[in-house]
Image (cartoon, rainbow, N blue to C red):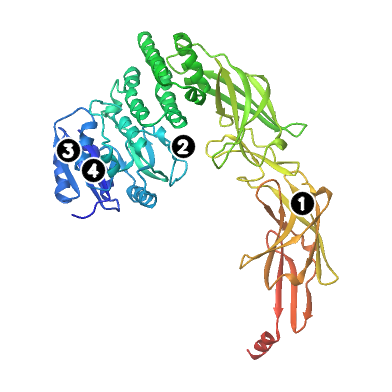
Amino acid sequence: MRDIDVSVVVPVHNCRPYLDRCLTSILVQRVSREIVVVDDGSTDGGADLLDLYAACHPGVVRVFRQGPSGGAGRPRNVGLSHARGRYVFFCDADDHLGPEALERMLAMADRNGSDIVLGKIVGHGRRAPVSMFHENADRVPLGDSAVYNSLSCFKLFRREMLERHAIRFDESLLVGEDVVFTTHAYCHAEVISVVADYDCYHLVDRPDGSSIMQRPGSRDPVAWLRMIRRPIEVMTSHVRPGALRDHLLRRHFRMDAFGSLGRPFLEAGPDQREEIAAEVADLCDRWLTDGVRDRLRAIDRSRLAALRDIDRLVRLAHVESAVVRRELTGLCWDAGGRLAVSGRVALSAPVGGDGPEPDVGGLVLVLRRRHEGPERPRDVVVPVDGGPEGFTGAVDVAALSSGVWDVHVRIECEGVARLARLGADRDGRIVPPVPRVAGGVVALPYFTRPHGNLSVDVGGHVVSVPGNVRLTRTRWMFGHRLAIDGEVTVGAARPAARAVRHLVWRERCSGRERREPVVAGEGGAFAVRQAANRLGPGTWDAYLELDLGGPPTLFRIEAPAEAIAPPRTWWRGLVRRNVRPYATAGKGRLSTAVRTLTPGAFVRRLLR
């Protein structure tokens, strides 16, 4: 028997239309794998197709049959009991894998000795988790990451870990059996890894609505709240009280308990709302610690205080479910050099139309800087004049640190803040104002693509800085120095003298560069005294480098023909050097051609 790296367990029940795509996506995986298919009493002809696959792929596709169990827990357990691979992956028959999914996850596991590998999940008509898939990670700490947010079983598990700790699916559950399984596995995993740069698992919605999760009542909030006690009990029996347990409990309260007080609460009838609130209250009595409370969102703390007030819970659910309708009505620079942002905003309740229209208050603009790294920079809050029907906020761009800032509008209702990007809904005549230089830093308002939201690039990180550098004159000075004088503008302004850094010569063929110091004056004027001997043979293009608060900004230098100094030739020992400044054809930009002639080259030229 050959060594098997991955056993893919596929529970099947009346999935004939999806089987080909599912099984083929596993067969094309370039790893040593087996497919353990458990037919859970299919009656749609899928059994014949499974026999065909098993006959065509002996030893690779293994089919086991049993009577219908009603859920996925029992067939997955049966498949796990027959698995022979070092790792196990669970794939539903109506879903499929990306062509390189197992190869990438297995490489991650072998490189790090992983017990669990999360591969990026993408949804097709179904919601897929995203918070844990921002970047690849060799080793993710359970208590300082978002991996516990994903409790589905569509992951790569080390089989030895599952066997050693008797980790199995709860066969008594029709919904949530994988939540119990994955929670138990997380409790024993020493190394957890993430593959985030490849679409590993494709989660597919069945058009006929026949999957368990699509059946009416599959996510009955009361039943779900009673089910969620089991994974919480499993987790708390393995994790001691403290920061880690509080971090994991926060997930269950935020996504399961208080999540049931959102849209499911609005869709429930009056009697069921009482039951939901009672179940949540009981969960809080048993497991809500001060550490969990400190980690809750503001709206969940409001719900916690209102568990005995059904009407307030309904209002809070309306606020959370409401659509934030906003429109950008104006964008310009004001007389003080601030970015004036005008708009309108309102909340509208989308569920049933029976909820009160929320009263809007606490209206501000919020600028949030995009970031890389574990710590998010502090938001900048900008007060506004006016009200929801028409407001204006003035953003002091000189006070923003270097980076890209996304503009949001924030409103409050029932003590709950709602945040939404601003700009996508706007009058087509609104265009970004010209860039502005403030305090030596350039600020570039722009609309993102493809969504068209308003952002401000401070320093020119993602938006090209518009500028113009014009040569006023060149002349030769003593010592074969080429004097270059010019002036620079950025947008419609002259940059501060400290922003002008270097004259950069870039050799056109090799790409090598030489930097020369620049003497900058007021009003964008600058001067360079270039020692022509420092430029080697080749064609050199001239750029002016500016520091505008972000990455170095390079502008080509426009050169009117009348401002170009004539060529100069001189001898240095036995080497003749010719330096010819010129304006390029077409756009007329400053370049310099440098040619040298040695005695050997002169002789070879004569002998041709």
Depicted 373 relative to depicted 469: above or below: above
Residue on which the image places disc 1? 488
Task: Give SS at disc 3.
Answer: helix
Q: Which residue is drawn at 15% across and 40% down?
A: 64
Looking at this view, is 589 or 271 the one in front? Answer: 271
Task: Give SS at disc 1.
Answer: strand
Using residue 441 as the reference point, say whether residue 44 is left or right of it. Answer: left
Q: How crowded is mark 3: few (under 14 residues within 10 Å), some or many (20 or more)?
A: many
> What percent of the width, then of the height, locates residue 595?
70, 75
**Comparing marks 1 and 2, which lies closer to the viewer?**
2
> What percent of the width, then of the height, locates residue 295?
50, 26
Disc nearer the start of the sequence (1/3):
3
Q: In which quarter of the image is residue 423?
A: top right
Task: Give SS at disc 2.
Answer: loop
> What percent of the width, then of the height, locates residue 600?
67, 87
Instruction: Look at label 2 and name its amino acid.
Output: Ser
The label number, if any, that marks residue 145 in the structure image: 2
Disc nearer the start of the sequence (3/4):
4
Residue on which the image places disc 3? 46
Q: For the view shown, which residue lies furthest in the bottom direction?
A: 607
Task: Give SS at disc 4.
Answer: helix
Q: Which residue is drawn at 19% across and 47% down?
A: 61
Disc nearer the start of the sequence (4/1):
4
Using residue 488 as the reference point, say whether residue 371 is left or right of it. Answer: left
Disc nearer the start of the sequence (1/2):
2
Kindly tell me whether residue 72 is visible in this rendering.
Answer: no
